[in-house]
Amino acid sequence: AQKVTQAQTEISVVEKEDVTLDCVYETRDTTYYLFWYKQPPSGELVFLIRRNSFDEQNEISGRYSWNFQKSTSSFNFTITASQVVDSAVYFCALSRINTGGFKTIFGAGTRLFVKA
Amino acid sequence: ETGVTQSPTHLIKTRGQQVTLRCSSQSGHNTVSWYQQALGQGPQFIFQYYREEENGRGNFPPRFSGLQFPNYSSELNVNALELDDSALYLCASSFRGGSGYTFGSGTRLTVV
């Protein structure tokens, strides 16, 4: 069975602080995709990153960085120098690679509050 | 390039009624998936359509059904609405063989 756990329900930080959102996943598949999405109050899910299971290189994109560790089944997301506009719910997700029934499993989300 | 659009944005229905939600896929995308997101939870996969056929289904009863049209737009139909069906319904389109979704802003359904 596939499962995504985001143990942090809510995180509150002050602007300019760094914050890390944790994600742990379970899957029996040897190849899979991992995602992070942002959901602002407007409701739409905004794609942030996709990582293939065979690519364990960490990635940095501006203030965002991702640490994928297959050995611990974790895919953590760090925001550096947080801003008020980063306030949203963040979801980690897992899906099989391009099989019939492209089903993505989402975690329960972490609500991030960034205070000015 | 247009994104995914969903209609209506909000809807209130009475228990036992039927509802149809609509989704227009992003240009160039041929696969559409529907998700249910209850308050405070992550989205739950309902089903996916590719070439007008259901191509995968989550743990939802048969009263949840869908359609995909030749232009890749889609409908989600829910019969015999229950109070627990109250949720945000998200549509996502993708290109089969690709790896990521584009999500719409969702339809907020309230069943009273």
Image (cartoon, rainbow, N blue to C red):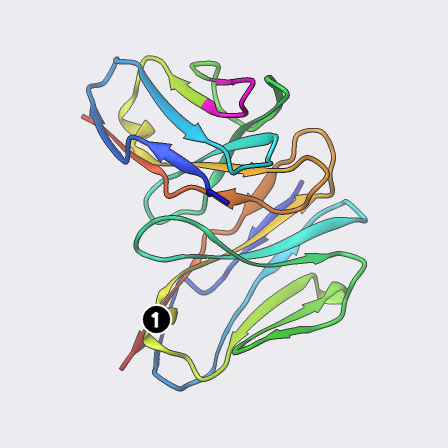
In the image, the segment drawn in magenta is B66-74
Q: Residue at x 40, y 47 (%)?
A: B41
Nearer to the camera, B26 or B79: B26
User: Which image quarter: residue B49?
Assistant: top right
Kindly identify which chain the residue marked by label 1 belongs to.
A
Nearer to the camera, A76 or A40: A40
How far across and down, in percent of the image, does residue A24 sit? 61, 60
How far across and down, in percent of the image, does residue A19 sit? 47, 78
How far across and down, in percent of the image, does residue B46 sit? 50, 29
Indicate the quadrant containing the C terminus of chain A: top left, top right, bottom left or bottom right: bottom left
Callout count: 1
Q: Is residue B13 magenta?
A: no
Placement of B106 over or under B16, stated as above or below: below
Tag 1: Cα neighbours inside 10 Å, few (<14), some, or many (≥20)?
A: few
User: Which image quarter: residue B10?
Assistant: top left
Amino acid on which the number 1 mark rests in the picture: Val
Left or right, A29 with respect to A64, comes to right
Q: Residue at x 67, y 40 (%)?
A: A1
Q: Is residue B69 magenta?
A: yes
Residue that sits furthest to the front in the current view? B1
Q: Residue at x 57, y 62 (%)?
A: A23
Placement of A11 over or under A36, stated as above or below: below
Placement of B63 over or under B97, stated as above or below: above
User: Which image quarter: residue A41?
Assistant: bottom left
Left or right, B39 with respect to A17, comes to left
Q: Secondary structure at mark 1?
A: helix
For label 1, the residue is A85
Q: Residue at x 42, y 41 (%)?
A: B104
